[in-house]
Image (spheres, rainbow, N blue to C red):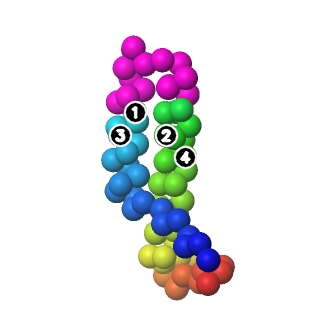
Amino acid sequence: MEKPVKKPAFEQCLQRLEVVVKELEKPELALEASVKLFEEGMALVDDCRKQLETAEAKVEVLVKRAGQVVPEPFKPESA
């Protein structure tokens, strides 16, 4: 049985994304290498976004009731 691939932490994704952006800014970078880096960067952005959304949801969900914001426990969709 194969182990699921563990995704890198948010901070690691962000650091790698910074490196990718710096590489893409180099004028001497070949088109093929640029496309590969761009694809990697987009995947990193997507992963960072998903991790942020998950973290926000885990903190708590705020529900507006009767003009007040009331904290409500997070209820994950799947366990």
**Discs 1, 2 touching: Cβ within 8 Å:** yes
Residue 50 is situated, as x and y percent measured from the top left of the image, at 54, 59
Q: Quadrant of the N terminus?
A: bottom right
CB atoms of marks 2 and 4 within 8 Å:
yes
- Say which amino acid is labelled 2: Gly
- What residue span does the magenta drawing correspond to? 22-35
1 and 3 marks in contact (CB < 8 Å): yes
SS type, badge 3: helix
Residue topped by disc 1 = 21
Q: What crowding class fits label 2: few (fewer than 14 Cα within 10 Å), some (14-19), or many (20 or more)?
A: many
Vertical comparison of 57 with 50: above or below: below
Q: Can you give x and y, in whole percent of width and height, for residue 36 in the image?
A: 54, 32
- Ranked by sequence position, the earlier of labels 2 and 3 is 3
Which badge, 1 or 2, comes first in the chain's sequence? 1
Q: Which residue is mark 2?
A: 41
Q: Measure the alpha-carbon separation of dots 4 and 3.
A: 13 Å
